[in-house]
Image (spheres, grey):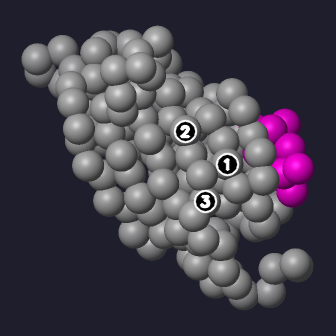
């Protein structure tokens, strides 16, 4: 069971992370240390050639990690990205992108996880990108 609810994360983002709303990012599922998030298809996210841009994909992946970290540790707003590595595997079609995230290791000060990104409706075709990320967790959180 997650240590923070979907509604609590949405409230936090509405108050402190307006870019989440601007991008239209949404939580579809949340578990302890895992989540599924969605980024809608928007014309603004496309790069020349009609594919979803790398920065848009990385934004979704970073959001997925934030949700997964908070789902494992609770509302610790100052958990921040310290590293994010994206491998772009195939061209995403224009449209919504789904991100499946899971934490691989959760320590006292660092969380490490992975995010697989898929074009919506094309999970069987394989991920369009694979992202690994590390988050720094501030000292003093309650276990």
Q: Residue at x 82, y 62 (%)?
A: 74
Q: From the viewer's perspective, tell me whether residue 2 is left or right of residue 83.
A: right
* Crowdedness near tag 1: few (<14), some (14–19) or many (≥20) residues, C-alpha within 10 Å: many
Q: Residue at x 40, y 69 (%)?
A: 83
Q: From the viewer's perspective, tell me whether residue 35 is left or right of residue 141.
A: left
Give the CA distance from mark 1 to mark 2.
8 Å
The image quadrant that residue 6 belongs to is top right
Q: Is residue 126 above or below residue 89?
A: above
Answer yes or no: is residue 66 visible: no
Over which residues does the magenta segment extend?
1-11
Name the residue beneath numbered marker 2: 100
* Crowdedness near tag 3: few (<14), some (14–19) or many (≥20) residues, C-alpha within 10 Å: many
Q: Quick one: label 1 or label 2, which is nearer the N terminus?
A: 1
Circles 1 and 2 in contact, beta carbons < 8 Å = yes
Q: Is residue 142 above or below residue 74?
A: below
The image quadrant that residue 123 belongs to is top left
- Residue 130 on the magenta segment: no
Query: Residue 94 at x, y = what percent?
Result: 30, 13
Assign a secondary structure to mark 1.
Answer: strand
Assign a secondary structure to mark 3.
Answer: strand
Label total for image: 3
Query: Residue 118 at x, y = what percent?
Result: 41, 28
Q: Residue at x 30, y 52 (%)?
A: 86
Name the residue beneath numbered marker 1: 34
Q: Quick one: label 1 or label 3, which is nearer the N terminus?
A: 1
Give the CA distance from mark 1 to mark 3.
6 Å
Name the residue beneath numbered marker 3: 103
Q: From the viewer's perspective, tell me whether residue 62 is left or right of residue 16.
A: left
């Amino acid at each position: 069971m997650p240590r923070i609810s979907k509604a609590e994360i949405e409230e936090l983002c509405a108050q402190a992370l307006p870019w989440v709303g601007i991008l239209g990012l949404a939580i579809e599922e949340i578990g302890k240390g895992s989540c599924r998030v969605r980024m809608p298809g928007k014309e603004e996210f496309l790069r020349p050639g009609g594919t979803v841009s790398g920065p848009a994909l990385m934004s979704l992946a970073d959001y997925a990690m934030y949700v997964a970290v908070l789902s494992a540790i609770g509302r610790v707003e100052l958990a921040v990205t310290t590293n994010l590595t994206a491998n772009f595997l195939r061209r995403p079609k224009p449209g919504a992108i789904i991100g499946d995230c899971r934490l691989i290791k959760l320590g006292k000060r660092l969380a490490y996880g992975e995010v697989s990104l898929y074009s919506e409706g094309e999970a069987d075709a394989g991920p369009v990108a694979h992202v690994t990320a590390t988050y720094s967790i501030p000292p003093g959180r309650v276990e």
